[in-house]
Image (cartoon, rainbow, N blue to C red):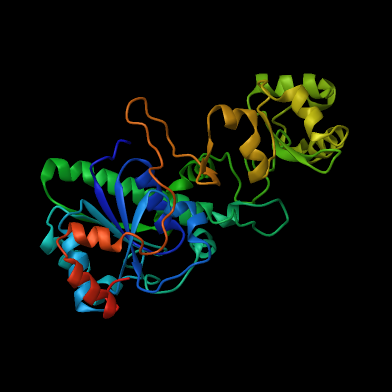
């Protein structure tokens, strides 16, 4: 099941973008084994969809026995990834050199906010800091207002977890040819910068200003924004192309004399105010009846619960039920090797005995390790 079937990947458990990366790889068919701390707990881990499809073991990596157990697991793996500060795994005895001595073909993924080197590499940080440093946050928000953090989608998940997953898969492809492993340095600052490529180009071409909220895609344009409806909900309009803008004018009843010059940036604020008045005249559902499915480039602004029941998302099974938990389905779709969710999120350490047993540990050894709190 899935194009990565047959690959074994070890996840040294963390929070946020690391588990997300592991989820994506597991959805695509890889056998992902999440290594947790002995005694680690979290509220309702079974409801955490980032844990789905992974086996979970608990090891004390501050003990020699726990490190040796992990290194035995490394011998059987294709890749391992971690999200600690630089140097932490080396101190534990499970850094790239130690692991690749046991398995020269190992792909060793490292994800941090600032990267493995540089003046800030040892500092703490979060998504909001990483996207601040790379020009992302400065570009998001309305004119004259402070920047708006886009949740932690850009730094943690796009710039971090997704780029790490891409790096691991790319390295595995190379290893299949060369027979050699390598280390991946996935920094959220680097990934965030790459995600801004189009906006760097637009600025260099003179198409974008550095002043947020004044450009075509950052709420500056009246034809690319969200508008409140009469019932206090919102719709989104993205009528960039002239033919789509023409259809917007026709369906919304906008005067061509007033709205005809779409690209006159000097009039964008004025036209936006006029459009705000127009869209407040109907409810969100009424605008959906008029515009949804047309070439206007329209969609209602849904919350995550509403999104689960929208007919388009239901037709594509964009959301699935896994043991009573609604969550996003694996993506993208494949014609032959369909991704899937093999099982729901496991409790911490639920598969310790099974996985270590596969490595040759006997029941009496496991009992002794549990007693010594080497494993959970």
Please provide percent x and percent y for residue 341.
Answer: 41, 42
Above-or-below relation of 245 to 279:
above
Q: Which quadrant does the C terminus fall into?
A: bottom left
Q: What is the tally of numbered marks visible in this picture?
A: 0
Relative to 3, is 340 on the left or the right?
Answer: right
State whether residue 41 appears in this view: yes
Relative to 160, is 360 on the left or the right?
Answer: left
Question: What is the quadrant of residue 121 in the picture?
Answer: bottom left
User: Which of 287/128 is in front?
Assistant: 287
Above-or-below relation of 311 to 122:
above
What residue lies at 78% left-to-right and 42% top-to-bottom?
Answer: 233
What residue lies at 21% left-to-right and 72% top-to-bottom?
Answer: 67
Q: Which quadrant does the N terminus fall into?
A: top left
Question: What is the quadrant of residue 214 in the picture?
Answer: top right
User: Which of 56/116 is in front?
Assistant: 56
State whether residue 109 appears in this view: no
Above-or-below relation of 325 to 236:
below
User: Which of 374/313 is in front?
Assistant: 374
Please provide percent x and percent y for residue 98.
Answer: 16, 68
Please provide percent x and percent y for residue 188.
Answer: 42, 58
Please provide percent x and percent y for residue 196.
Answer: 49, 47
Relative to 181, is 166 on the left or the right?
Answer: right
What residue lies at 64% left-to-right and 28% top-to-bottom?
Answer: 311
What residue lies at 57% left-to-right and 56% top-to-bottom?
Answer: 137
User: Which of 197/114 is in front?
Assistant: 114
């Amino acid at each position: 099941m899935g194009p990565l079937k047959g690959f074994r990947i070890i996840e040294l458990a963390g929070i946020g973008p690391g588990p997300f990366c592991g989820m994506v790889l597991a959805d695509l068919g890889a056998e992902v084994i999440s290594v947790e701390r002995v005694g680690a707990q979290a509220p309702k881990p079974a409801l955490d969809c980032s844990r789905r499809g992974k086996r979970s073991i608990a090891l004390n990596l501050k003990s020699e026995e726990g490190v040796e157990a992990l290194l035995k697991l490394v011998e059987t793996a294709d890749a391992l990834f971690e999200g600690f500060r630089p140097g932490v795994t080396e101190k534990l005895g499970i850094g790239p050199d130690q692991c690749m001595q046991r398995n020269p073909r190992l792909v060793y993924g490292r994800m941090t906010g600032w990267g493995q080197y540089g003046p800030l590499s040892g500092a703490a940080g979060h998504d909001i800091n990483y996207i601040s440093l790379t020009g992302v946050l400065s570009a998001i928000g309305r004119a004259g207002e402070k920047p708006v953090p886009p949740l932690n989608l850009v730094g943690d998940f796009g710039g971090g977890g997704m780029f790490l997953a891409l790096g691991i898969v790319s390295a595995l492809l190379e290893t299949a040819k060369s027979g050699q492993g390598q280390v991946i340095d996935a920094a959220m600052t680097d990934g965030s910068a790459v995600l801004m490529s189009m906006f760097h180009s637009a600025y260099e071409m003179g198409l974008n200003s550095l002043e947020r909220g004044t450009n075509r895609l950052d709420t500056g344009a009246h034809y690319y924004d969200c508008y409140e409806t009469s019932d206090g909900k919102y719709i989104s309009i993205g009528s960039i192309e002239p033919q789509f803008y023409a259809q917007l004018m026709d369906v919304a009843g906008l005067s061509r004399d007033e709205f005809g010059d779409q690209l006159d940036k000097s009039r964008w604020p004025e036209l936006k105010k006029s459009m705000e008045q127009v869209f407040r005249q109907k409810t969100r559902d009424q605008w959906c009846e008029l515009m949804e499915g047309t070439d206007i480039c329209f969609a209602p602004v849904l919350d995550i619960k509403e999104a689960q029941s929208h007919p388009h998302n239901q037709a594509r099974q964009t959301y699935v039920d896994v043991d009573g938990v609604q969550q996003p389905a694996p993506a993208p779709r494949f014609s032959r090797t369909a991704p899937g969710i093999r099982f729901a999120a496991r409790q911490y350490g639920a598969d310790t005995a099974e996985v270590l047993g596969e490595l040759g540990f006997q029941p009496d050894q496991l009992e002794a390790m549990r007693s010594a709190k080497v494993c959970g």
